[in-house]
Structure formats: C-alpha cells, structure tokens
Image: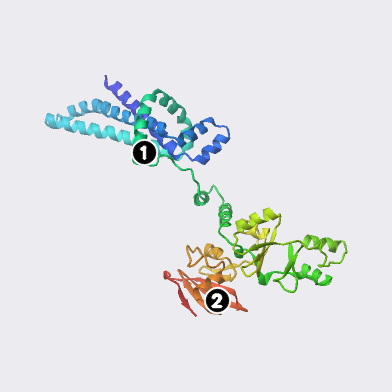
C-alpha cells in the first residue's frame, strides 16, 4: 500500500471514529423534554431516539465496537505509514536501533494525538452543544450498523448485562424531573436571557405555593373589615364606600361568631336598585368556606376549586378567626412584580445597606429581598414578627434588636403589641454564625 493510500485510509478511520464519538455524546446529552416536543411536532426520528434512550444497550455496544476497532486499526495504519520514514530520517543522527525505537514512539504519539483531538475532543464538544440535532442525524446510520453487526452486538450485550446483574449495577436512567430541576433550568434560562427574570420569578412563585402557608398571604384578623348582622343600611353603605372589598364577613356580636359573608356585587345590586340593605336577609348571606391556618396556598386553591369559592375564612386550632384570604391574594403571590401593587410596599429599601420592613411581611419575602440563604427555626413562624419573637423568646419592644448572619433587625415601632416597623441593616463585617440578641 502506497503512502498516499495509507494516509487516505488513516483519514477515513479518523472520520468514522469521529462519527461514533458524535453518536455517543449526542444520545447521552439529548434532553428528553426537547425530544418529546420534537416528536409531538411529527418527528419520527425524535421518537426513535427516545426509544433508544430508554434502552441504550445495543446502541452503545455498536458505538464501542466501532470506536475500539477503528482506534486499533488507526494505530496500525498510523504506525505503518509514519514509522518507516521517521526511522529513516532519524537514522542519519542516531544508531539504527535507537532510530527505530524513537521513530515508533513519535508515530504512536502523533497517531494517538490525532485520534484524541479529531475523534474525541472536537466531536464531543460539538455534540454537547447541539445534541438533539445530531442525535436525529445519526440515529438512522446507527440503526443500520446495529442490524449489520447484530450477532456481535447481541454477544457483547449479553456479556455486559450478565455482569451488571452479577454486581447489581444500575442499567437504566430514571426520567424523574423534580421541582428543583425545573427551577434550576428556569434560572439558567433567565441567566442566558432566553427567559425574562420576571417570568422566572413567576415560575418560582408557583412552586412556592406548595410550601407557603395561609398566614403568609392572608389579610390578618386586625385588618379584616366585617359587618354585624344587625348593622343598619347607612352603616353598610358607608363602610363599603370607605373600605371597598370583594367580600365581607357577617358576624353575630363579634368577629369570632361568623354567620356568613356578603359580596360587593350583591350589595351594589341593592344600591343600584335603590333597595334597602338588610343583612338579616338570608338571600344576601353566603355560606363561607372555612379552612385551617395550617393549609398551604396550593391546598387552599384546591379548596376553592372544590367549593366553587374565591373567598375563605381562616381559623386556628382554637376556632378563632385569624384572617381571610381571597383568590386574588394567592394570585398576587404568584404574579409578584408583574402586577402593579395597589397596596403600600411592605419592604422599602432606604439605602444600599438598610430596609424598612412591616412586621407582618412574610419571612420568605424578607429572605428574598435581603438575599438570606437560611434562618433558624423557619418552620415555627410565617412573618418577620414571628422571627423576632422566636429569637427573643418574648414579645419585642421598641429598640429590641436581633442579629443574624450579616443583618441586624431592630424594632422601630410597636402598636399595641403588634410589631409595626422593623429596620433591617446589613452589617459592615461578616455576621456571626449564631444569633446574637440585644435590647
């Protein structure tokens, strides 16, 4: 075989070996979700790739047969075409035995380097960049090779499966996608610019519904606007004009004895029809949806759907009303910054290192705004006020402080034992690991 023929054969061996490297990484790196989307759009090749991913034994066996056979042949051809001229050249400067040894070593290094760079590094990096596109292109030739090499493939697959069973090794990939995986992908998409930051935040908020309990989003007891069942017409009209809401609890004597609720729609119909409003009228009163305060926001959405309601009263374990929540409250948590807040912001940034925060602000919102990774006993409270009470082990007073991590939380205002305003300040030096309390 001439030198030209040998070089052409070596080039073909390198080219075919590159194909197998591409095929291997393209299959492994292809995303099942992307492939399913392509399959749903009518791609038969995408469906074939999905089937191979579920049981890749034969496919990988063909890859390994091809890569190893070609590498061995490439080594033989490369040594045969490069070693003689190198030996002859080196013989002019070295003894014949040394020249032959060094010529073989150089030819081996050159051939191996060509295979490493051209048949391994370059194809695999390209396949990692566009795996699905390449997987669809190579699936046809790989199926043909699998058919041609079937006896050999079956032998190697049987041997491999026998050893896997013998050593109890895993041989299938679980296609389990967790919420953490989805959040990680959306965060990567936001960083890459393919997903808007606000859209990524909405997705994160949706998953947060599974962990946030009702007190983190409800209207608290002290802020609930309600009617007594014997309130006269003028009182009802005055209150809905000064404090408009979608629904109002109707109580007997006090807020802990709830009869039902009335909607602003029904009240407006009476006003527009010039009819008197009497809360003793049973046609005005709706039976309320009552839920415990330990439910999550996701669970209350299920309750809304089952009851056909968008308004719920929240009771604690002592059957006392602690607040109420509407569907709009839950959706405000989901939409976050995408909706224009009609209420006063609960977290107001004063400068680069300080924030003024309402005591009833959900602790998740505080952590997000201040970029705090973890807080102690986070399963014992829902709000910033609860955090301060837990750390101080008492009802805070004005000027009380809690130092945690890199932040100092100082109580600025207390209204009838309710923590009204808290100043959060970022410390100039790294914070201690444990909380430090000061009054």
**Location of residue 16 by image quarter:** top left
Q: Nearer the viewer, mark 1 or mark 2?
A: 1
Q: Residue furthest top?
A: 1
Q: Position of residue 125 (x, y in %)?
A: 40, 39
User: Badge 1 is on which residue?
Assistant: 165
Q: Residues within 10 Å of mark 2 (few under 14, many from 20)?
A: many
Closer to the N terminus: mark 1 or mark 2? 1
**Location of residue 142 by image quarter:** top left
- If the image is split into quadrants, where does the N terminus sit? top left
Residue 37 visible in the picture = yes
Quick check: 357 left or right of 426? right
Whether the residues at callouts 1 and 2 have beta carbons within 8 Å, the answer is: no
Q: Is residue 413 above or below residue 329?
A: below
Q: Position of residue 157 (x, y in %)?
A: 37, 31
User: Badge 2 is on which residue?
Assistant: 411
Q: Is residue 352 above or below residue 125?
A: below
Quote the CA–CA distance across marks 1 and 2.
63 Å
Q: Residues within 10 Å of mark 1 (few under 14, many from 20)?
A: few
Q: Is residue 216 above or below residue 46?
A: below
At x 48% / y 36%, what residue is drawn? 132
Local SS, label 1: helix
């Amino acid at each position: 075989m001439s030198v030209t023929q040998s070089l052409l054969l070596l080039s073909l061996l390198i080219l075919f070996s590159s194909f197998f490297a591409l095929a291997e990484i393209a299959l492994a790196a292809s995303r099942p979700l992307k492939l399913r989307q392509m399959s749903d759009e009518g791609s038969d090749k995408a469906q074939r790739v999905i089937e191979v991913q579920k049981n890749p034994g034969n496919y990988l066996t063909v890859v390994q047969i091809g890569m190893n056979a070609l590498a061995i042949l490439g080594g033989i051809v490369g040594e045969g075409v490069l070693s003689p001229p190198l030996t002859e050249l080196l013989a002019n400067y070295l003894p014949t035995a040394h020249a032959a040894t060094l010529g073989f070593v150089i030819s081996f290094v050159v051939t191996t380097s060509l295979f490493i760079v051209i048949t391994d590094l370059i194809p695999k990096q390209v396949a990692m960049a566009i795996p699905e596109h390449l997987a669809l292109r190579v699936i046809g030739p790989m199926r043909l090779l699998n058919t041609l090499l079937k006896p050999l493939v079956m032998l190697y697959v049987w041997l491999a499966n026998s050893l896997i069973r013998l050593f109890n090794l895993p041989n299938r990939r679980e296609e389990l996608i967790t919420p953490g995986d989805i959040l990680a992908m959306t965060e990567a998409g936001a960083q890459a610019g393919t997903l808007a930051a606000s859209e990524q935040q909405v997705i994160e908020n949706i998953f947060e519904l599974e962990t946030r309990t009702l007190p983190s989003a409800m209207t608290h007891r002290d802020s609930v606007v309600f009617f007594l069942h014997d309130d006269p017409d003028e009182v009802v009209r005055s209150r809905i004009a000064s404090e408009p809401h979608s629904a109002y609890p109707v109580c007997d004597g006090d807020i802990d004895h709830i009869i039902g609720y009335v909607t602003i729609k029904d009240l407006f119909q009476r006003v527009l029809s010039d009819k008197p409003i009497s809360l003793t009228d049973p046609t005005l009163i709706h039976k309320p949806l009552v839920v415990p305060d330990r439910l999550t926001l996701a669970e209350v959405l299920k309750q809304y759907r089952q009851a056909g309601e968008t308004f719920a009263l929240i009771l604690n374990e002592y059957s006392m009303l602690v607040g109420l929540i509407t569907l709009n409250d839950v959706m405000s948590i989901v939409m976050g910054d995408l909706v224009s807040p009609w209420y006063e912001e609960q977290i107001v940034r004063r400068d680069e290192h300080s924030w003024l925060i309402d005591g009833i602000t959900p602790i998740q919102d505080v952590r997000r705004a201040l970029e705090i990774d973890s807080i102690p006993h986070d399963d014992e409270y829902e709000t910033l006020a609860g955090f301060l009470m837990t750390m101080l082990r008492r009802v805070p007073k004005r000027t009380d402080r809690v130092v945690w991590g890199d932040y100092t939380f100082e109580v600025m205002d207390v209204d009838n034992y309710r923590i009204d305003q808290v100043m959060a300040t970022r410390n100039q030096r790294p914070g201690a690991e444990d909380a430090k309390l000061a009054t």
